[in-house]
Image: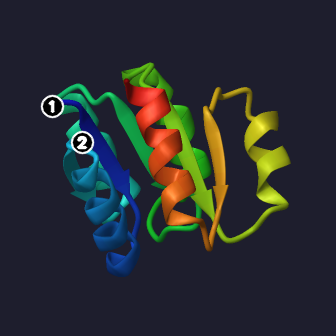
Amino acid sequence: MKKVLVIDDEMSIRLLLREIIEDIDMEVFEAETAIVGLKMLEERNFDLIIMDIQMPQMNGLDAMRKLREITDAPVFVLTAFSHLEGVVENLGVEIQEFIEKPFDIDELAEKIKKQVR
């Protein structure tokens, strides 16, 4: 079974993503902070990472740099700020999808299926 790691400090977003991902028969792992997510990445491999940018303790931009030291798994970035797409691209860190909140559930499900399968 494909494994997806969701890193987001908002429980409601994690629960919504869990529902979307489980509905397409993939296993979901959740982290409420980037620090917890990075620790999980050190312990197991994931087929996809979906990560928010705005988080406490360590933001998603800093986490992206550290994440690439651990894994080359595809990353979908979630944000409520459309202007951050250029910032993320300028980091030189490859992302597969830039997803602006609020997002279309069916569209996101299709993007996940396409990326992982």
Residue at position x 61%, y 48% in the image: 61
Q: Nearer the viewer, residue 3 or 8?
A: 3
Q: Amino acid at mark 2?
A: Lys
Q: CA distance from mark 1 to mark 2?
A: 7 Å
Callout 1: few (<14), some (14-19), or many (20+) C-alpha neighbours within 10 Å? Answer: few
Percent of width and height locating residue 1: 14, 30
Residue 13 sits above or below residue 67 on the image: below
In the displayed structure, does residue 71 sit left or right of residue 23?
right
Q: Residue 93, percent across and down?
A: 65, 28
**In the visual, does 26 lie left or right of 63?**
left
Q: Dot 2: few (<14), some (14–19), or many (≥20) neighbours within 10 Å?
A: few
Q: Are the residues at dot 1 and dot 2 in contact (C-beta closer than 8 Å)?
A: yes
Residue 97 quadrant: top right
Amino acid at pointer 1: Glu
* Vertical position of residue 29 compared to residue 73: above or below: below
Residue placed at 67% from the left, 47% from the top? 98
Residue drawn at the location 22% of the way across and 53% of the way down:
22
* Quadrant of the drawing holding the C terminus: top left
- Circle on res. 1: none
Q: Which of the numbered marks, if any, corresponds to residue 43?
A: 1
> Image check: 95 left or right of 11?
right
Along the line of sight, the residue nearer the viewer: 4 or 53: 4
Please, what secondary structure does the residue beneath circle 1 have?
Answer: helix
The image's colouring method is: rainbow
As helix, strand or loop, the secondary structure at mark 2 comes to helix
Q: Position of residue 60 (x, y in %)?
A: 55, 53
- 95 vs 66, nearest the viewer: 95
| Residue assigned mark 2 | 39
Determine the residue positioned at 27% across, 64% down.
19
